[in-house]
Amino acid sequence: MKEIAVVVVAMDVVEDAITIVIKHSPRALETSAFVNTRIDWKETPEAHVFKADVPGFKKEEVKVEVEDDRLLQISGERNVEKEEEVTWHRVECCSGKFMRMFRLLENAKMDEIKASMENEVLNVTIPKLEVKKPDVN
């Protein structure tokens, strides 16, 4: 059976979050888990907190970047390891790319972003600017 290349493009616009995933893979139908990489975004009184499940990714395969002042971009790429003289009978471990972009609010301190990864979960914390309370006289 001959494999054919498949291109999957997914775009999801929810509020100010935009997801664009482009996947080129002969096994795209079997390795499409990254198309739906889910990221939670919550706002606490102190910070914006992003939590992304990135199973199978190593820390060096995931990037957190800021573009255009307030555009947070979280992306990653994982490739299938190529081995000489090996016949694969089934490939179920995922490979591919993902990219998520979030337009941050004006109260985010963009110069104080912190990211960490533990147990295949990426955590990104962006502190908020302190809100000056009006003087009550």
Image: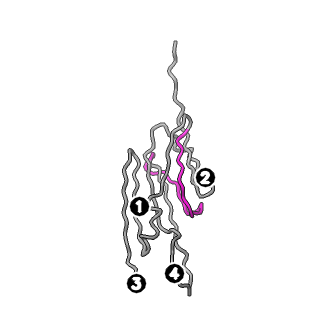
Which residue matches tag 2?
A: 116
* Image coloring type: one colour
The tag earlier along the polypeptide, 4 or 1, is 1
Q: CA distance from mark 2 to mark 1?
A: 23 Å
Residue farthest to the right, as pictured = 118
Q: CA distance from mark 3 to mark 1?
A: 27 Å
Mark 3 crowdedness (10 Å alpha carbons): few <14, some 14-19, many ≥20: few
Classify mark 2: helix, strand or loop.
strand
Q: Position of residue 83 (x, y in %)?
A: 56, 81
* Depth order, front residue of 134/89: 89
Mark 1 crowdedness (10 Å alpha carbons): few <14, some 14-19, many ≥20: many
Q: Which mark is residue 95?
A: none
Q: CA distance from mark 2 to mark 3?
A: 43 Å
Label 2–label 4 contact, CB within 8 A: no
Which residue matches tag 1?
A: 21
Type of residue at label 1? Answer: Val
Mark 2 crowdedness (10 Å alpha carbons): few <14, some 14-19, many ≥20: few
Q: Quadrant of the N terminus?
A: bottom left
Q: Residue at left 58%, top 48%?
A: 114
The tag earlier along the polypeptide, 2 or 3, is 3
Residue stretch in magenta: 47-70
The tag earlier along the polypeptide, 3 or 1, is 3
Residue 7's image quarter? Answer: bottom left
Q: Residue at left 36%, top 56%?
A: 11
* Depth order, front residue of 7/87: 87
Which residue matches tag 3?
A: 1
Type of residue at label 3? Answer: Met
Type of residue at label 4? Answer: His
Classify mark 1: helix, strand or loop.
strand
The tag earlier along the polypeptide, 2 or 4, is 4
Which residue matches tag 4?
A: 89
